[in-house]
Amino acid sequence: MRELLSGWFAEYGPMVEGVVARTVRLGDRDLVEDLAQDVWVKAWQYLLRGNEVARPAGLLAFFARCRVVDHYRLARVRRELLSDFQDEAAVVRLASWIGAAA
C-alpha cells in the first residue's frame, strides 16, 4: 500500500497541489502545501480502510476540492463564534473558554 501511495504521489502530486491552488482564495496561497498534505493523509486513510480506486486522479481531485471547502467552512464557523466582541455575552463566553483551557 505504501508503494501504491508513493506512486500516486509521484504521478499526481503536482495535480493535487494545482487543484488546491486553483481552489483557495488568492490571499491564502500560503495554505496550498498544508492543504495538499491533508489530501495525501486522507488518501492514505482511504486506502487503509480497504477501498479500491479505479481512477486515482479523480479521487485525489475530489479530496483536494473537499479539503479546501472544509477549510473555509470551519474557518467561518470559528470566526463567527469569536469575532463579535460588541456582544457582552460573547465576551463572557470567550473569557470562560479561555479560563477553562488554561
Image (tube, rainbow, N blue to C red):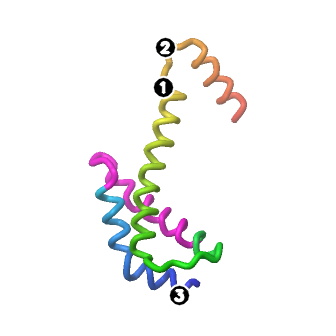
Label 2 sits on residue = 86
Q: Give the quarter of the image for residue 101.
A: top right
Residue type of the residue flagged with mark 2: Gln
Q: Position of residue 97 (x, y in %)?
A: 66, 29
Placement of the N terminus among the 4 image quadrants: bottom right
For the residues marked 3 and 2, what is the alpha-carbon distance in whole angstroms?
54 Å
Q: Amino acid at mark 3?
A: Glu
The crowd level at tag 1 (other Cα within 10 Å; few <14, some 14-19, many 20+) is few
Looking at the rendered structure, the kind of residue marked 1 is: Ser
Among numbered discs 3 and 1, the one appearing first in the sequence: 3
User: Does the rendering let one see residue 102?
Assistant: no
Nearer the camera: disc 3 or disc 1: 3
Identify the secondary structure beneath mark 3. Answer: helix
Residue at 47% over, 40% down? 75
On the image, numbered disc 1 is attached to which residue?
83
Secondary element at tag 2: loop
User: Residue 25: x percent and y percent?
Assistant: 31, 47
Q: Report the span colored magenta.
A: 23-44
Residue 65, position as x, y percentages in the image: 40, 57
Residue 59 at x, y = what percent? 45, 69
Q: CA distance from mark 3 to mark 1?
A: 45 Å
C-alpha separation, residue under disc 2 versus residue under disc 1: 9 Å
Between label 3 and label 2, give the one nearer the viewer: 3
Q: Is residue 42 above or below residue 5?
A: above
Q: Which residue is mark 3?
A: 3
First-in-chain label (3 vs 2): 3
User: Which sits in the foreground, 100 or 90?
Assistant: 90
Q: Are marks 2 and 1 in contact (CB under 8 Å)?
A: no
The answer to whether residue 82 is seen in the rendering is yes
Residue at the location (64% across, 22% down)?
Answer: 93
Judging depth in this view, the residue of 18 and 100 nearest the camera is 18
